[in-house]
Image (cartoon, helix red, strand yellow):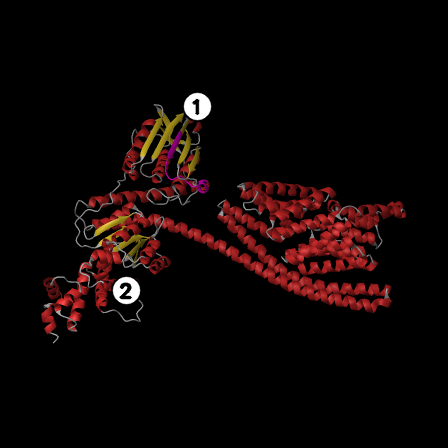
């Protein structure tokens, strides 16, 4: 039998053999050698891991007998390579099995089968692991080795646990625990309790798992199981990690202890897992650099050891880490490596399948050799043993094939689940990108609408009112230019082309002139703007452009997120001791949510933080300020509480000795500068002034104040215009005033345009109103969603004012044609098989209500409104919109139609007929009848005879 596993080992053993003659006294003292070897082999299991293989190989070379001592040495070597080199570990275990079977050493054969079962279990070869454990249990039970049967039960419990067969795993773990307590085997008991803890954690029983793990740890410490303690400590850390929320402090403590224990005992597999787990804890604690170091160490070790399943899991942790670092390029690389390892494992699984078939063939040959050896010793019982072993082998083969198929199916399902999870995560990332670009599109399209549409107006206007549109274009052009400039500045920072250029100037005078540009803005928005400038007279070295951008963005944000009546404070002072300039901007506005504070300086970050005019931020301003402050070698801090306000503090160096990194300009800062055009805003009133040509009413629902006012002015000379700044207000006005047309934006805070359309269509009083939606999202899916909700038309930004007017006019004209149709159906109801709409149901109920009260002369508009559960105004607007007539005329028309029917049928005298349809006076009845039919009632009656 060949015991050499590598060239290195073979050379060392050969050298020892050549030196044997020089140590003949050792060979002669055979009894002494045997006692020494027995002492080595009876040490604790962890000793094999701490003992170097060279010493074991040296003992093996000196001992030339084929007996139980050699079997135990093989097992020691197998223990050493377990988890380090699975090929070596498996080969030594098989050598031990062959030699033990040949020599009839049942105890060693059972131990070797258990060891081989553990090796197969670690390699996720469940069917082979179960077969080896059953073989070990059979040998141990037959020979009365009760502790070894307990180890077999434990290995089978571990294997079934990996297959998530909790019923079988629990059964075998209970057997192993019982056997360990019966025999007093503390090592077996510690391992079994650890396995039971693993089963509890997979069943989501965290308290139960922790109980078993801690008891296992206590026993392991008592008996000195240093090699095994790393696994137990890691498992306890996993329990704390799986909490909701995870207990990161305790998890970190136990993973650190596991790492130390693994390194001390030489447990490479335990060290790899501890590094990966500790790296995950650091990642969740925000220690991203330390996390990356540990994860890379774990990856390196798993690659060196060839444990690719651990490498695969570590790559997923590195993907999560890279995403937290916003390093999407590195995340993509790790995902590619993850898939490469996964594909390798899938291919490796097929290779292992072929190897298992070969191994099965070799096992059959070895089994035959064993049987032949046993036949030489026990020829008289050969036939009986042959049939028993043959039957057991067939049963084992059938069980192995069944388990193999089950394992393959389960692995295929697991792979599919992982693929679906990764696909879902990638789809979620794509959705986040789509939302981001949609929001950016909305930010750019609204200013473009306010540039393109007013320009079209200016080509047709020659009056002084055109000055309003000119100012509107100017403000929004400056706003668009500001956004573009911020984007360009950020790109310069990323390219490293931005620099600080300082010059000498009157800092205090410059600040006062600059801040004055915000006072008109504060006055227009009715915000209390308080300033404190504590800057000594004299010149200072500062970068005017960078300081202006910092103040503009800080004050601009403060005014954006502060409502009327609140306060914005600016404090600027020179700190003489440090020689720095301190700028503090605070407000009593809406504040920033705590979860968004770590990301406020990230480019393009947009939280649910809404400005005072209902618009979200662009995510550019504070990112630009942060880059400028870092370039200026300064400090920036933010403190905020939601619904209470925000404070931003910036500290910049002023002393020339601290500005060595900056370039000094040759020209000084000018003594004054013009106020920035971006702050020269005027708050336009929502009232619409102008002569009204028609009686139609239009409701404009738009969260952008300037766009809302512009649309209102576009229709001011043609219709009566109502405005609403959000969906809630728009729904309230639509219910109370019942307009003829509603023009609504889609993207609004709170109730958006889609939801507003749904609410309008669900109310009887407003369901007939045509709705036109305006949006920056022009894709087909968004348009289809709006139209399916019940919108009558859809117009993308930027839009043409003429096109908007034509569409509104078409809606009103179409509503009038529909009113004529309803008037006809009011007299002649539609066929019974027609599916009625909400408006049809309303008109039917209206007709029935008037018909039931037709004879009541005092029945009028007030009584009809009460019967229909509407206000007088709502009833008027609803009837006018549907029938193009008033409720009074409608009641009279139905009465006269009924009177005509009665006259034609000679139901009664003309006087009684007039009374029966609600007319008290004959003269008034005759007058209304003549207006309706062109003849008097009597002439109408004579014409039918």
Could you say where residue 791 lies in the image, as x and y percent from the top left? 31, 58
Which is nearer the eye, 62 or 209? 209
Locate residue 243 relative to residue 357 in the image: left or right. left
Query: Mark 1 touching mark 2, by CB under 8 A?
Result: no
Could you say where residue 224 lies in the image, as x and y percent from the top left? 73, 43
**Quick one: SS at disc 1?**
loop
Residue matched to label 2: 840
Residue matched to label 1: 577
Query: Which residue occupies 30% across, 64% down?
Result: 837
The answer to whether residue 409 is seen in the rendering is: yes
**Quick one: SS at disc 2?**
helix
Q: Residues within 10 Å of mark 2 (few under 14, many from 20)?
A: some
Could you say where residue 345 lies in the image, as x and y percent from the top left? 61, 57
Where are the magenta residues, as a range? 582-597
Circle 1 or circle 2, nearest the eye: 2
> Where, by quadrant of the figure, is residue 219 drawn?
top right
**Which badge, 1 or 2, comes first in the chain's sequence?**
1
Locate residue 77 relative to residue 304 in the image: left or right. right
């Amino acid at each position: 039998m060949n015991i050499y596993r590598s060239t290195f080992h073979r050379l060392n053993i050969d050298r020892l053999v050549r030196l044997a003659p020089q140590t003949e006294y050792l060979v002669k003292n055979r009894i002494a050698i045997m006692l020494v070897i027995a002492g080595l082999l009876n040490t604790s299991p962890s000793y094999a891991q701490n003992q170097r293989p060279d010493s074991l190989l040296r003992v093996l070379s000196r001992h030339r007998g084929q007996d139980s001592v050699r079997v135990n040495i093989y097992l020691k070597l197998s223990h050493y390579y377990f988890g380090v080199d699975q090929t070596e570990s498996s080969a030594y275990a098989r050598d031990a099995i062959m030699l033990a079977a040949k020599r009839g050493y049942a105890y060693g054969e059972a131990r070797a089968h258990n060891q081989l079962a553990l090796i197969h279990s670690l390699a996720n070869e469940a069917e082979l692991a179960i077969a080896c454990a059953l073989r070990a249990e059979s040998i141990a039970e037959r020979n009365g080795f009760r502790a070894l049967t307990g180890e077999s039960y434990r290995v089978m419990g571990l294997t079934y646990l990996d297959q998530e067969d909790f019923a079988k795993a629990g059964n075998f773990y209970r057997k192993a625990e019982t056997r360990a307590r019966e025999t007093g085997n503390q090592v077996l008991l510690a391992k079994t309790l650890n396995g039971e803890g693993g089963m509890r954690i997979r069943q989501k029983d965290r308290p139960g798992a922790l109980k078993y793990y801690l008891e296992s740890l206590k026993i392991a410490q008592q008996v000195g199981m240093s090699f095994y303690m790393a696994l137990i400590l890691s498992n306890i850390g996993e329990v704390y990690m799986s909490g909701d929320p995870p207990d990161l402090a305790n998890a970190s403590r136990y993973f650190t202890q596991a790492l130390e224990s693994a390194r001390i005992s030489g447990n490479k597999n335990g060290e790899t897992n501890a590094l990966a787990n500790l790296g995950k804890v650091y990642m969740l604690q925000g220690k991203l650099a330390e996390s990356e170091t540990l994860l890379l160490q774990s990856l390196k070790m798993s690659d060196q050891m060839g444990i690719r399943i651990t490498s695969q899991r570590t790559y997923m942790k590195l993907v999560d880490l890279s995403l937290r670092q916003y390093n999407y390029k590195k995340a993509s690389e790790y995902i590619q490596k993850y898939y490469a390892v996964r594909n390798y494992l899938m291919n490796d699984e097929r290779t292992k399948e072929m190897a298992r078939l070969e191994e099965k063939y070799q096992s059959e040959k070895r089994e035959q050799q064993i049987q032949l050896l046993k036949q030489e010793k026990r020829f008289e019982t050969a036939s009986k043993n042959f049939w028993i072993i043959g039957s057991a082998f067939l049963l084992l083969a059938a069980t192995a094939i069944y388990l193999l198929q089950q394992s393959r199916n389960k692995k295929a399902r697991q792979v599919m689940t992982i693929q679906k999870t990764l696909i879902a995560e990638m789809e979620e990332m794509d959705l986040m990108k789509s939302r981001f670009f949609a929001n950016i599109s909305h930010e750019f399209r609204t200013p473009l609408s306010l540039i393109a549409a007013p320009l079209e107006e200016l080509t047709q206007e020659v009056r002084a009112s055109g000055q309003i549109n000119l100012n509107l274009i100017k403000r929004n052009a400056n706003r668009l230019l500001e956004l573009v400039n911020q984007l360009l500045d950020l790109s310069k920072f990323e390219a490293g082309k931005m620099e600080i250029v300082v010059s000498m100037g009157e800092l205090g005078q410059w600040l006062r002139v600059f801040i004055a540009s915000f006072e008109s803005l504060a006055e227009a928005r009715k915000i209390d703007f308080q300033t404190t400038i504590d800057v000594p007279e004299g010149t200072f070295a500062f970068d005017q452009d960078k300081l202006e951008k910092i103040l503009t963005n800080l004050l601009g944000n403060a005014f954006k997120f502060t409502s009327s009546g609140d306060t914005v404070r600016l404090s600027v002072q020179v700190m003489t001791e440090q020689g720095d300039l301190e700028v503090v901007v605070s407000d009593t506005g809406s504040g920033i949510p705590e979860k968004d504070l770590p990301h406020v300086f990230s480019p393009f970050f947009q939280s649910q933080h809404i400005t005072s005019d209902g618009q979200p931020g662009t995510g550019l301003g504070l990112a630009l300020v942060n880059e400028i402050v870092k370039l200026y070698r300064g400090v920036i801090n933010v403190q905020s509480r939601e619904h209470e306000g925000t404070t931003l503090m910036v500290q910049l160096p002023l002393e020339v000795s601290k500005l060595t990194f900056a370039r000094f300009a040759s020209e000084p800062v000018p003594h004054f500068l013009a106020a920035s055009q971006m702050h020269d805003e005027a708050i336009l009133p929502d009232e619409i002034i102008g002569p009204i040509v028609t009686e139609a009413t239009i409701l404009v629902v738009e969260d952008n104040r300037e766009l809302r006012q512009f649309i209102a002015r576009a229709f001011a000379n043609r219709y009566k215009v109502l405005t609403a700044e959000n969906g809630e207000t728009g729904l309230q006005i639509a219910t109370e005033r019942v307009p003829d047309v509603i023009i609504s934006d889609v993207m609004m805070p709170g109730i958006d345009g889609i939801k507003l359309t749904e609410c309008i269509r669900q109310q009887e009083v407003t369901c007939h109103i045509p709705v036109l939606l305006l949006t920056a999202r022009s894709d087909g899916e968004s348009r289809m969603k709006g139209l399916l909700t019940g919108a009558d038309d859809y117009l993308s930004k930027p839009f043409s004012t003429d096109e908007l007017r034509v569409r509104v006019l078409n809606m009103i004209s179409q509503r009038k044609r529909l009113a004529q149709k309803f008037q006809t159906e009011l007299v002649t109801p539609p066929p019974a098989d027609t599916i009625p709409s909400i408006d049809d149901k309303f008109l039917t109920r209206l007709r029935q209500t008037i018909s039931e009260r037709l004879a009541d002369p005092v029945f009028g508009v007030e009584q009809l409104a009460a019967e229909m559960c509407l206000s007088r105004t709502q009833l008027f607007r609803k009837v006018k919109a549907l029938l193009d007539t008033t409720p009074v005329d409608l009641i009279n028309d139905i009465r006269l139609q009924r009177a005509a029917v009665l006259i034609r049928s000679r139901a009664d005298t003309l006087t009684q007929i007039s009374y029966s349809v609600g007319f008290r006076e004959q003269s008034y009845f005759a007058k209304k009848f003549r207006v309706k039919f062109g003849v008097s009632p009597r002439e109408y009656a004579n014409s039918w005879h």
